Image: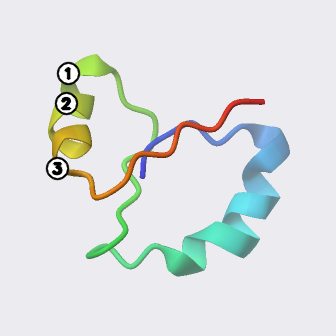
């Protein structure tokens, strides 16, 4: 899992998301640019691209 956590979403992320990140099945890579994206996207079981 990668992406920017905006300040407005920080509490939700800490309270509802962090507990599910186990470092094995789910990793959090923070916000990443194009080059580091290619390997995780290529090996991902699923890709979720939410929009507002």
Q: Is residue 41 left or right of residue 7?
A: left
- Mark 1 is surrounded, within 10 Å at the Cα level, by few (under 14), some (14 to 19) or many (20 or more) other residues, namely few
- Return the x and y of residue 48 as percentages of the image width and height: 50, 45
User: Looking at the image, which residue is at 43% across and 44% down?
Assistant: 2
- Return the x and y of residue 5 as percentages of the image width and height: 64, 42
Give SS at disc 3.
Answer: helix
Give SS at disc 1.
Answer: helix
Upstream in the sequence, badge 3 or badge 2?
Answer: 2
Q: Is residue 21 left or right of residue 19?
A: left
Scheme of colours in the image: rainbow
Q: Identify whether 35 is placed above or below 21.
A: above
Number of the label disc, if any, that sits on residue 22? none
**Which mark is in front, 2 or 1?**
2
Q: Identify whether 32 is placed above or below 29.
A: above
- Mark 3 is surrounded, within 10 Å at the Cα level, by few (under 14), some (14 to 19) or many (20 or more) other residues, namely few
Q: Are marks 2 and 1 in contact (CB under 8 Å)?
A: yes
Give SS at disc 2.
Answer: helix
Kindly give the residue lying farthest to the top in the view shown.
34
Q: Which residue is mark 1?
A: 35
Residue 22, quarter of the rendered image: bottom left
Q: Are marks 3 and 1 in contact (CB under 8 Å)?
A: no
**Which mark is in front, 3 or 1?**
3
Q: Is residue 43 left or right of residue 45?
A: left
Q: Which residue is mark 2?
A: 38
Q: Which residue is mark 3?
A: 43
User: Looking at the image, which residue is at 20% across and 21% down?
Assistant: 35
- Return the x and y of residue 37 as percentages of the image width and height: 27, 32
Q: Is residue 5 left or right of residue 36?
A: right
Out of 16 and 42, give the one closest to the viewer: 42
User: Looking at the image, which residue is at 84% across and 42% down?
Assistant: 8
- Return the x and y of residue 16 as percentages of the image width and height: 71, 72
Residue 41, quarter of the rendered image: top left
């Amino acid at each position: 899992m990668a992406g920017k956590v905006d300040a407005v979403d920080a509490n939700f992320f800490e309270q509802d998301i962090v507990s599910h990140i186990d470092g094995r099945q789910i990793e959090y890579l923070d916000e990443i640019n194009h080059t580091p994206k290619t390997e995780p996207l290529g090996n991902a079981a699923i890709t979720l691209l939410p929009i507002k």
